[in-house]
Amino acid sequence: MPDNTIRSNSEVVLIGAGIMSATLGLILKELQPDIKIEIYERLDVAAAESSDAWNNAGTGHSAFCELNYTPEKADGSIDPKKAISIAESFEISRQFWSYLVQENKVPSPDNFIKSVPHMSFVWGEKNVEYLKKRFEALQSNPIFSQMEFSSDFEKLKEWMPLVMEGRDANEKLAATHMEIGTDVNFGALTRSMFSYLEKLDGVSLFFNHEVKKLRQREDKSWRIKITDLTTGKTRKAYTKFVFIGAGGGSLPLLEKANVVEGNGYGGFPVSGQWLKCTNPEVIAKHQAKVYGKASVGAPPMSVPHIDTRVIDGEKALLFGPFAGFSTRFLKNGSYLDLPLSIKANNLIPMLSAGFHNIPLTKYLIEQVRQSPKDRMTALREYLPTARSKDWKLEKAGQRVQVIKKDEKEGGVLEFGTEVINTHDGTLAVLLGASPGASTAVAIMVDLISRCFTAQAKTPEWQAKMKTMIPSYGQTLNDKPELLAELRKHTSDVLKLRNN
């Protein structure tokens, strides 16, 4: 019988058409214009899972408002390191996006980014004290120097009138405010990037194509078996480098790659829902992203927040997310995703992580059992005058938190984004969730330095990196003048407020 298998060769294969693959593909194509790239996506459109606007908060995660990035230590002090690192990473994203806009590689920034203030909001004496300490720990750093703090009732009304409606003026309340926060439509940005990429020579983008097998050959290259879901035909792709950026689908593909670096990794899926406002008058009253404190045991993606969004030119208002549990790893996944991901090499870490995260399990059970009345009660902590008739429940995205081996605990649940790469640099996999998309550029720049080590050190690649990201190789928190200069530049290009 004739072999109808289609075969192709490339230097890079990207699996998953989300923000990570788009960012990596574009950076590589800028660094080496003649590089040959193939992109495979299981669905029929780019950015349909985690990168889609309705599947994430759209917060330009810059640690301006997310309290989980500034933990309180045992001695009561606040550790700002993670917040500073994330804020630095978001500045890198802003620089790269500005480069894309200036070079006409993506359309007007109005399509994907807007100025929306970022706020943290708490109530109760202990929480107000924590927020004041957090403010003092952050605001002394140049990268957070524009942060304001207030516990004054009238000032809070000025910052967030809808949140303050119906509140007692004697209640202990406090908030921090960052005027330079943003709302990002990562779905629109991702699709714009792919639209530019697929027009370039040497780039092939395949939708409705599912990766079935990955195998490394003796010469360290990879053979990938792919099924065309439309025709049922098989394709074999041969490549020197593979990046798996398939969101919740990354873990099963890492297991199929069968590399030692993937041993011990597991995943814990967390689903989400939003309450979406349907009343234009209410939507018009709020113009901020207001984040609160997470419940005990809650994953970071479930930190409650009342969010102004701008999606496809239309203003929206969301509250949530309400967490849930599903055995699917993707919104469009299978209920068998979790059970099929459990293997001999990750069984102990998975069981151990489950044992050490009983509060999380309890929290998720409580969330799943919530009634509409329970959800409205949670919303009224942020909007005391909220009416049930103005809100409807919408599905949000599916996230898979990373479980990894740990010498002391046996296995730990990681909240964040993690990149695994093989020692030979021929395969890299992105696992995890928030702050993900917001820090995609910094993550991909680091991946390139690890997986394209020799090329990354060449004067040509170094110079191009500095053209795309002017602060490349530097930190900004210790260079206030450079930070101010770059913030002004990116604000001007992206049409954002700078103060």
Image (spheres, rainbow, N blue to C red):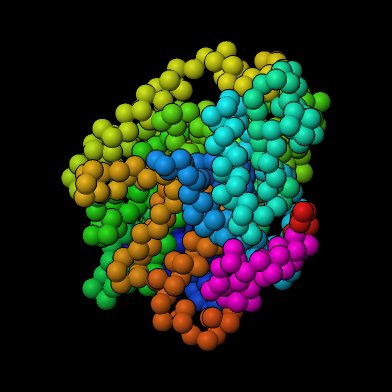
Q: Is residue 198 visible?
A: no
Residue 300: percent from left, percent from top: 48, 39
Q: Residue at horizontal 54%, vertical 56%? A: 84
Q: Nearer the viewer, residue 492 or 191?
A: 492
Q: Is residue 160 left or right of residue 224?
A: right
In the current view of this chain or complex, which residue is farthest to the bottom?
Answer: 459
Residue 132: percent from left, percent from top: 60, 39
Q: Is residue 172 visible?
A: yes
Residue 348: percent from left, percent from top: 20, 41
- Quadrant in which the N terminus is drawn: bottom left
Residue 284: percent from left, percent from top: 80, 31
How many callouts does the rendering have?
0
Let me know if residue 487 is in the magenta part.
yes
Q: Is residue 459 left or right of residue 430?
A: right
Q: Residue at horizontal 50%, vertical 68%? A: 445
- The quadrant holding residue 222 is bottom left
Let me know if residue 378 is in the magenta part.
no
Q: Is residue 395 left or right of residue 95?
A: left
Above or below, comparing residue 311 to residue 366 in the picture:
below
Q: Residue at horizontal 67%, vertical 55%? A: 145
- Quadrant in which the C terminus is drawn: bottom right
Above or below, comparing residue 392 to residue 254 in the picture:
above
In the current view of this chain or complex, which residue is farthest to the front?
Answer: 75
Q: Residue at horizontal 23%, vertical 43%? A: 409
Q: Nearer the viewer, residue 12 or 450?
A: 450
Q: Decide whether the magenta segment is chiefly helix, strand or loop.
A: helix
Tell me which segment is drawn in magenta: 465-493
